[in-house]
Amino acid sequence: MNKGRGIALPKAERWQVNRIGRLAIGCVAAIAIGGGPIAQTEASISPAPVTLSRAQNVDWLSPETASSLDLGFPVLIPGGVPSPFGGEPSVSAAGGYYSLYWMNVAADPTFLQITGQVGGGLPAGSPYDLNNQLFVNASVQGYEAIHDVTPIYDQVWWIADGVLYSVASKNLDGSDSLSIANSLFALEAPSAPVETPEPTAETPTDPTKVAAPTDPTEVAAPTEVAVQPSILAQQSAKAGDIVAITVGDAVNVNLNADGGLFSDTGETAIFNINGGSYNWQAPAVSEKTNFTLSVTSPDTGATLASMQISVSPSGNSSTGQAQSGSTVEATSTAPAASNTQDATSTLTTSNGNPPATLASDITPVSTSVATVPSSSGSDLLSDGTDGPPPPVIGGDGTGGILVVELPRNSSAGPQP
């Protein structure tokens, strides 16, 4: 044994120790070296969120209003607010329909309405006069169009990509419906910012779990679609006429008129009504006048639908002619005294003596007058022709019977 020196191991055992030591050192080094790249890789797979958005292409609509017009089909709008209007229009949008409506209420109303309806068709007759058939007579942005100009509106219709568009106006400054229609373009509504989500670790799927089966009897709840109110009535009337105004697809709205009275209230408006028919009396006018009737929101006052009725003077005259069903009072007027004569003094025989009078020769003349019932239930005096009453026979002012004395035999000569 050698003092001061360690224990000497056999050669084979020394090789085994050295091998184990080298393996341990290598593992520690690998862990130390490999930790950096692993941590760096995990940090690099967490990207920052990306925000996406789209800006609208007009500034006269608020972002909220423009967003409400994102309907899935081209919504045509003007590049600016047409003169003489100012500010945003009254906007209605639901499903496959939209409407932009400007209106200035004055002595002669001024308005502009732009609409679009998916699947709509061109009108066959003029809304002003349905007897006036309409034909393609214009062009809008390369599409066939119908242009109808009347005393109460100027309107053009055309179909593009399955959508019926319309522009109706009156009293615009330096423009008309056809010019505005050719200047319209599609609205680009703003989109809300969208953030891409951060990646998350996927949870492994347990192959032993089975997804619950879907119940085939369950039906998804229908989606409610807002319906645009409508207003319909005849296009013309005479002063004093009662016109039925039909309001459709409406709940809790106001019905207004800029003239005339509603029978339900005796005023120019009816408040908080639903769809139905309401009577409106045309006012007295001295010349043909247009009156606007509109359905408005009781909350915002916005116009939801409107139309115009042309009212003409009634043309009644005081001729005294009776109308069917009216009451007519029959009167008789006694002739003047200077024209009244005793009928017996005009009848004489050839020698100048009055003829003899026999009661048997006197035939009373009946003054009874037939009556004809009218449609109202009252009776009108008539001579059988349903005309005015016949005159009353009798010249003494009492309306009695005129007695005429005639000779029984003209050849008998004077009677004693």
Image: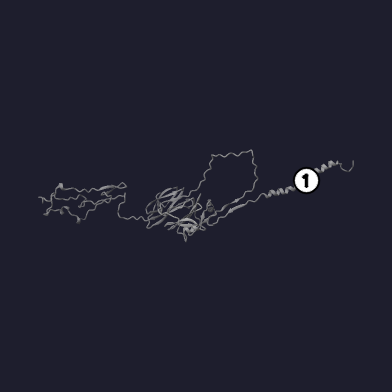
Q: Position of residue 209 (x, y in %)?
A: 63, 38
In the figure, 21 relative to 115: above or below?
above
Q: How many marks?
A: 1
Residue at the far bottom: name it. Answer: 174
**Residue 275 spot, x, y in % from top left:** 44, 47
* Residue at position x 77%, y 45% in the image: 28
Which residue is depicted at the point 71% across and 48% down? 39
Give the crowd class for mark 1: few <14, some 14-19, many >=20 residues within 10 Å. few
Q: Quadrant of the N terminus?
A: top right
The foreground one among 244 and 257 is 244
Which of these two is toward me, 392 or 115? 115
The image position of residue 26, as x and y in percent, is: 78, 46
Front-most of residues 13 and 414: 13
Please report the residue visible at 74 percent of the width from the left and 47 percent of the height from the top: 34
**Residue 149 occupies quadrant:** bottom left
**Relative to residue 3, is residue 360 drawn left or right?**
left
Q: Secondary structure at mark 1?
A: helix
Horizontal arrangement in the rendering, residue 119 relative to residue 312 (left or right): right
Say which residue appears at 72% left-offset and 49% top-offset. Answer: 37
Question: Which residue matches tag 1?
Answer: 26
Residue 144 seen: yes
At which x and y percent is residue 10?
86, 41
Type of amino acid under label 1: Gly
Do we see residue 103 in this rendering?
A: no
